[in-house]
Image (spheres, rainbow, N blue to C red):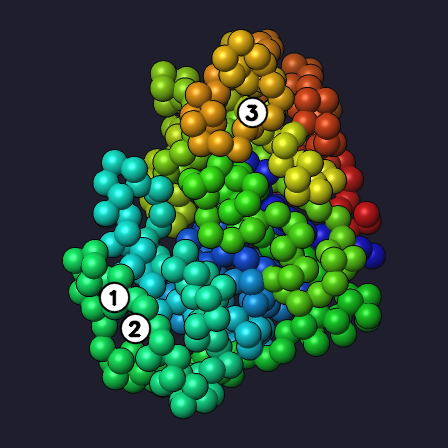
Amino acid sequence: MPNVAVIGAQWGDEGKGKVVDWLASRADIVVRFQGGHNAGHTLVVGNETYKLSLLPSGLVRGKLGVIGNGVVVDPDALLAEIARVEAQGLKVTPDRLRIAENTPLILPLHSALDRAREAARGEHKIGTTGRGIGPAYEDKVARRAIRVCDLAEPETVSRKLDELLLHHNTLLKGLGAETFEKQDLFDRLMALAPRILPYAEPVWERLDEARRAGRRILFEGAQAVMLDVDHGTYPFVTSSNTVAATAASGAGIGPGAVGFVLGIAKAYSTRVGSGPFPTELHDATGQLLGDRGHEFGTVTGRRRRCGWFDAVLVRQAVKVAGIQGIALTKLDVLDGLPELKICVGYRLGGEVVRRLPAAPAAQAAAVAEYETMEGWSGSTRGARSWADLPAQAVKYVRRIEELTEAPVTLLSTSPERDDTILVRDPFEG
């Protein structure tokens, strides 16, 4: 049985939480492989709603959760999240959660620098969450990050803090922000060490053993392809690679073990924060989509910008991320609309292209070219088979398949876990 990697095929917030939860019930291990607590997954299980940022979604289903080395972990945020879900009755112990020992840590100075930089950008803000994700990845690449394994070596922590503070305090002072004292950070980390270290291990060994034993591994992505630091709408992106290839490097396995790549896409488009959005709607339809879809970010709380489905963008995500099948979510939000539009190209000057350009000015100038389809009067909400769908809704899904050049392998018709139409089982390859 192959493994499965789940990634977002748009700008995030596509409903990955429900899909991952549905797949996690059939997996043995669920692995987070990139991002930090700037991502949010909402899971509805019976009468309980879990909002997760760092914890792998499989924990809700009693599966082993793994936080891979490609993630950056704020230890305070992690412990707070553990406390929150435990208050809901979900036990999170070292037997159920493992963290790669080489995972970099987010420190208070990272979030302080993140916020100070964003404030300094003024009207050119990127729209970061201010949680220190970017600065933490910078320190990882600059080889000065404090990692989980370092918590067992106070001398290493002390030495690295000297280098970190030399760098960060200089930047913070230049930005007019408050600086940090070494002793305060050192004491804080030493107090966290006995609470974090019991979860740490070389998870690559565990995953290798699981793979050899034929156990099913689900790789849970955060954010989405169009927020990838290389392939997204740069600079309005996250600070990590979000494509499926990162599941290998971010978990410590070979690329051949990643398995089937499932891309999650809404039946329309949304985006949180700044950046280009060619199909954005500023009218009553955009407001309707936001209201019906309850479009508020799980982490940020910000209202999401809404627009028509962008088949050009999703097709590009399919190509660069190796997506083999699409899980289409929130089809029910479109119920009752008299007509629907799908973006089939971008007009750039006198030319129409089927790709999102890399240059920021060209991205901002791209004007969506639409194909119009008839809507449907019936309801798709709660449908669990193709026969339950209005004929025009089926046509809409089929057209999305044609334009994105990827099959819809799973269709979600409500937030409820079982309101899902399975076309092809990702675990079956």
Quadrant in which the N terminus is drawn: bottom right
The amino acid beneath tag 2 is: Leu
Measure the C-alpha gap from mark 2 to mark 3: 45 Å
Q: Can see residue 280?
A: yes
Q: Earlier in the sequence, mark 2 or mark 3?
A: 2
Cβ atoms under marks 1 and 2 closer than 8 Å = yes
Nearer the camera: disc 2 or disc 3: 2
Give the labeled residue for mark 3.
Answer: 310
- Residue type (three-letter) at the residue carrying disc 3: Asp
Q: Residues within 10 Å of mark 3 (few under 14, many from 20)?
A: many
Which callout, 3 or 1, points to the residue nearer the camera? 1
Residue 155, image quadrant: bottom left
* C-alpha separation, residue under disc 1 versus residue under disc 2: 6 Å
- Label placed on residue 166: 2
Q: Quadrant of residue 78?
A: bottom left
Q: Is residue 6 left or right of residue 87?
A: right
Type of amino acid under label 1: Thr
Residue 429 or residue 246, whichever sits in front: 246
Assign a secondary structure to mark 1.
helix
* Residue 395 in the image, given as x and y percentages of width and height: 69, 17
Picture coordinates of residue 426, whole percent (x, y): 75, 46
Q: Is residue 28 above or below residue 294?
A: below
Would you say the residues marked 2 and 3 are in contact, meaning their CB atoms lie under 8 Å apart?
A: no
138 with respect to 225 (left or right): left
Q: Residue at x 25, y 84 (%)?
A: 183
Most foreground residue, 107 or 421 = 107
